[in-house]
Image (tube, rainbow, N blue to C red):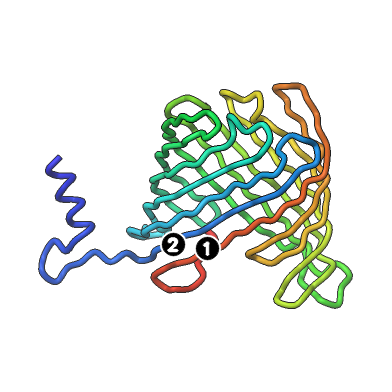
Amino acid sequence: MAGNLILFSCLAFPCAPGFAFSPAAYPGAVWMMSGRDTNGIYGTNTQGSVRQGVELLCLDGGQPLQVYGKYTWRFRNINKDYYNSYAPYLGAMLSFKFVDVGAEFGWPHYTGLSNGSQDYSVFANWSRYWSLKDWRKSDFIKALPLSTWGSAAYDLSNKNGSSTMGWVKLQADVFWLPHNIMAGPLVSYDWRLRTRNADYFNLSEISSGLEIGNDVVQLGAKYSWSHYPKLNQQDRGMYYYITIYKAWDLKSAGPAKDK
């Protein structure tokens, strides 16, 4: 216990005259998605997270290690008892070029059930973007971005077991508007899978639609074909949405890399 207190004191305060711990960065990010479906499964819904971290050090290969606090939420007005929740988290992660690996501890509270729980997990998140053609305003298809995001996690409390979720999206941008706003048709594939409590979680979904936006805000409408393998149930319908993502570094008071 004494050793832990000494270590905390050295990180938080000067341990000797002339020395002070100075974080390399204060990275943070906010993500939010709100929307409405027409097939009566989600209704009007919103979910998101806000994260603020402190970069403690960089490894020899340039990989930053950070500790962070995070607040997440998700709410909808249909089938909400086992869905609506909010949760504070504490965690640490090591970031590579396209992948973050880490561990976090959270305290989810389910508002429809008036109870809470604890969440211990280790995870790996990835994100990647490819430009399949050079951007040209004179072309009919001005850009052809292919992007993916995903997460794999293991719940150490064994409530949800192993899980993965994510998406792959291909968009053909046919309109190039002021302020680098792009618009065009898209196709996407989404998945959710886990080994425990999976009946209403596991999902495979193919979508086609239209999206307009820039690197911060996107507005879209898509028609989705959804399959719930554990329930042997299929659904389809329109979904209208807005997504927001913004990263920052409080130390540089400017935009941060997408991590």
Name which residue lies at 11% across and 64% down.
16
Give the Cα separation between the discs numbered 2 and 1: 7 Å
Q: Which mark is residue 247?
A: 1
Q: Which mark is residue 124?
A: none
Q: Is residue 39 left or right of residue 53?
A: right
Name which residue lies at 60% across and 53% down.
32
For the residue pair 49 and 17, the one nearer the viewer reads as 49
The relative height of residue 157 versus residue 214 in the rendered view (above or below) is above
Where's the N terminus, which quadrant? Answer: top left
Count of numbered circles on the image: 2
Secondary structure, mark 2, is strand
Task: Tell me which label, 2 or 1, sits earlier in the chain.
Answer: 2
Type of amino acid under label 2: Pro
Q: Residues within 10 Å of mark 2 (few under 14, many from 20)?
A: many
Q: Are marks 2 and 1 in contact (CB under 8 Å)?
A: yes
For the residue pair 57 and 46, the one nearer the viewer reads as 46
Name which residue lies at 18% across and 57% down.
10
The relative height of residue 163 versus residue 35 in the rendered view (above or below) is above
Residue 23 placed where, x, y %? Answer: 32, 64
Type of amino acid under label 1: Ala
For the residue pair 82 and 249, the one nearer the viewer reads as 82
Residue beneath disc 2 = 27
Q: Is residue 72 left or right of residue 184?
A: left
Choose top left, top right, bottom left or bottom right for residue 138.
bottom right
Q: Is residue 177 left or right of residue 65?
A: right
Q: Residues within 10 Å of mark 1 (few under 14, many from 20)?
A: many
Q: Is residue 185 left or right of residue 54?
A: right
Secondary structure, mark 1, is strand
